[in-house]
Every structure is written in C-alpha cells, then in structure tokens.
Image (cartoon, rainbow, N blue to C red):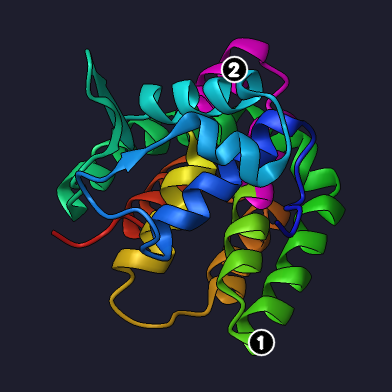
C-alpha cells in the first residue's frame, strides 16, 4: 500500500481499510477478513485487529458473533451526527486559543497554503489531511488536554474523509473557507467561537 502520512502501523492499516471502503472495495454488509488484510500488508493480525476495533468504535464497521466484521450501510445522516459535537468542542477551543492565535497564525497559514495546492490539484486525500491538520492546530492551541483527547476520540479524519469524498454535493474551496477563519483570529474577532462552530456545521453532509 502507499503509506499515508500517519505515525503508527495501526493508523496506516486503518487508513488502508478506510480507503478500501471509500473506493468500494468493501461494500455495505460485506465482511472484512482480518487475516486476509494481515497477509496482504505483510503484518501480524494484532495491528489489523486494533485498526478494526478503532473503526468499529467509530461505527464505520460492526461485528457480530460468528459473523465477523462487516461494513455498515452508512447514510449522510449517520455521518452528520458527529458534527454538532465536534462543532461545540471547536467553539470552546477557538475561544480558549483566541489570544495565542491572534499573536501568530503561522501554523494555520501553512495548512491553508497546502489546501490551496490540494484544491488546485483536486486532491481529495490532501484536502482531508490538511483540513484535519488545520482544525487540530486550533484545538491544540487551546492548551486543554481533555479537550484535545475528546476531539481526537471523534475520529475527525475518518468522518472528514467520508464527508468530502462520498457526500460533498459539489467541489468547494477548502482553502478559502479556512482562510476566513485565519483572518478572524488575526483581527481578534470576538465572535470567533460561533464563527468556527458555524464553519464546522457547514461541512456536515447534507441529508
């Protein structure tokens, strides 16, 4: 497989399985066989099992006794459920991080520039990667470990992948959307929290 930009074998395997689901290799209701993935990637079954467990915790796949692991039949409504939760967390993060980010938005600007390149190339994978990185920078800047851990537990990268590549109604300028957030931090907009919340909600799949 082509290694994605991640930090562990489990994450690489998770992204490999997710890519297979997005591209239709595994259809809804179809079984994902742990040992076959392990043999294909030349790894032990342990990290494959860990990756599958993570995807199951995100409700992307489901398991049943004597039936193994299968892909859920996801709808836009399923994907949309996490967005109000994420939006609330990011509103808090933006308000906590506002002072720090007003003094320096370099990390955010770097991701916006990479998003411009991805938009021009029509590179969906890069759009996902840098969209998630942008939002992670805001949550990190809040300086609250509980908030960051809770945000990470939502599987933002997984749901962003499916939202952009499955359910986006039309191409959009991800860079421009995020540049507006950067500009709001720079001008110390007192409504930065609600602005970021509205931005996240606008990214939810349309039902």
Q: Residues within 10 Å of mark 1 (few under 14, many from 20)?
A: few
- Write the start and end of the magenta stretch as one range: 133-154
User: For mark 1, what is the residue?
Assistant: 121
Seen from the viewer's position, the closer of residues 74 and 101 is 74
- Residue 163: percent from left, percent from top: 37, 58
- Residue 79: percent from left, percent from top: 27, 46
What label sits on residue 149 in the rendered view?
A: 2
Q: Residue at x 34, y 65 (%)?
A: 166
Seen from the viewer's position, the closer of residues 77 and 188 is 77
Location of the N terminus (image quadrant): bottom right
Provide the major secondary structure of the magenta segment. Answer: helix
Seen from the viewer's position, the closer of residues 19 and 182 is 19
On the picture, is 73 further left or further right than 189? left
The relative height of residue 106 versus residue 157 in the rendered view (above or below) is below
Q: Residues within 10 Å of mark 2 (few under 14, many from 20)?
A: few
Q: Residue at x 72, y 32 (%)?
A: 43
The relative height of residue 191 versus residue 45 in the rendered view (above or below) is below
Residue 104 in magenta stretch? no
């Amino acid at each position: 497989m082509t290694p994605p930009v991640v930090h562990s074998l489990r994450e690489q395997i998770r992204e490999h399985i997710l890519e297979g689901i997005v591209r239709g290799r595994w259809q809804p209701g179809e079984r994902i066989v742990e040992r076959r993935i392990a043999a294909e990637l030349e790894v032990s079954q342990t990290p494959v099992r860990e990756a599958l467990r993570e995807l199951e915790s995100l409700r992307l796949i489901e398991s049943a006794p004597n039936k193994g692991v299968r892909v859920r039949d996801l709808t836009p409504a399923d994907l949309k459920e996490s967005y109000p939760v994420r939006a609330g967390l990011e509103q808090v993060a933006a308000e906590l991080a506002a002072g720090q980010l007003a003094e320096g938005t370099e990390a955010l600007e770097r991701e916006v520039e990479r998003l411009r390149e991805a938009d021009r190339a029509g590179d969906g994978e890069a759009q996902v990667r840098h969209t998630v990185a942008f939002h992670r920078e805001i949550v990190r800047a809040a300086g609250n470990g509980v908030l960051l851990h809770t945000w990470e537990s939502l599987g933002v990268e997984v749901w962003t992948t499916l939202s952009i590549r499955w359910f986006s109604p039309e191409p959009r300028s991800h860079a421009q959307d995020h540049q507006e957030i950067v500009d709001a931090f720079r001008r110390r907009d007192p409504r930065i929290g609600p602005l970021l919340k509205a931005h996240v909600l606008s990214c939810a799949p349309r039902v």
